[in-house]
Image (cartoon, helix red, strand yellow):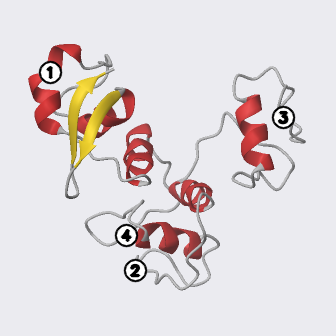
Amino acid sequence: MAYPSDFTDITGSEWYADAVGCMTQLGIVSGCSDGTFGGDKFITRAEFAVIISRFDTLLRDAENTFTDIPDRYWAKNYIASVALRGWASGCTDGIFRPENSITRAEVVIIVNRMPNRICDTNFIASNAGAIKRFSDLNTDHWAYCRICEASNAHDYERGNNTEIWTALQ
């Protein structure tokens, strides 16, 4: 194992052991208070906000705009920081739902936003036969294009807040 960790529930044979060890050494993940990592547990939206906030400097002056995050909430500053950066957002009703589990689709949206990756819906529509497909993802799914952005290697040109795909790789 290239990146060992001290978590009591990681032996090194888990498929994610090296990734966890690396992210731990970089200070991105810290595990649970009981010394475990909890690799089979669901992750909350608050926990994911904390993780992604560690990829950049925490914006300590970011204002919390979510009505369901009290001032003393343990992840308030992290959530406010990633929201101010535009990486994560709440729901249309002004709440964040920090204790809800985060879905894979929500993670893809956030991960795309971090480097400002923008889906080229026209290219995807006109090249539908060549786009990587998932059996449980329909083209009318709310995150379909954003999942295509993350799962299809492609060449692109950057426009004014756009990404114009030029070819699939």
Camera sees residue 100: yes
Classify mark 2: helix, strand or loop: loop
Callout 1 amino acid: Asn
Mark 4 or mark 3: name the one nearer the start of the chain. 3
Vertical side of 104 occupied by 34: above or below: below
Q: Residue 9 got which mark?
A: 3
Tag 4 residue: 95
Q: Where does the image place residue 92, in percent across and percent down from the top left? A: 25, 65
Q: Name the element at disc 3.
A: loop
Quarter of the image for residue 126 reads: top left
Asked if residue 107 lies left or right of residue 3, the reply is left
In-front residue for pair 96/111: 111
Q: Position of residue 9 (x, y in %)?
A: 84, 34
User: Between marks 1 and 2, how big is the CA–CA gap?
Assistant: 40 Å
Upstream in the sequence, badge 2 or badge 4? 2
- Image quarter of the C terminus: top left
- Kind of residue at badge 4: Ile
Picture residue at 40% right of the left edge, 78% below the top: 67
Q: Residues within 10 Å of mark 4 (few under 14, many from 20)?
A: some
Amino acid type for the residue under numbered disc 3: Asp
Q: Which mark is residue 127?
A: 1
Query: Which three-letter amino acid code belongs to the residue tagged 2?
Result: Thr
Residue depicted at x 90% and y 42%: 6
Tell me the residue that label 2 is attached to: 65
- Which x, y percent locates residue 50? 60, 61
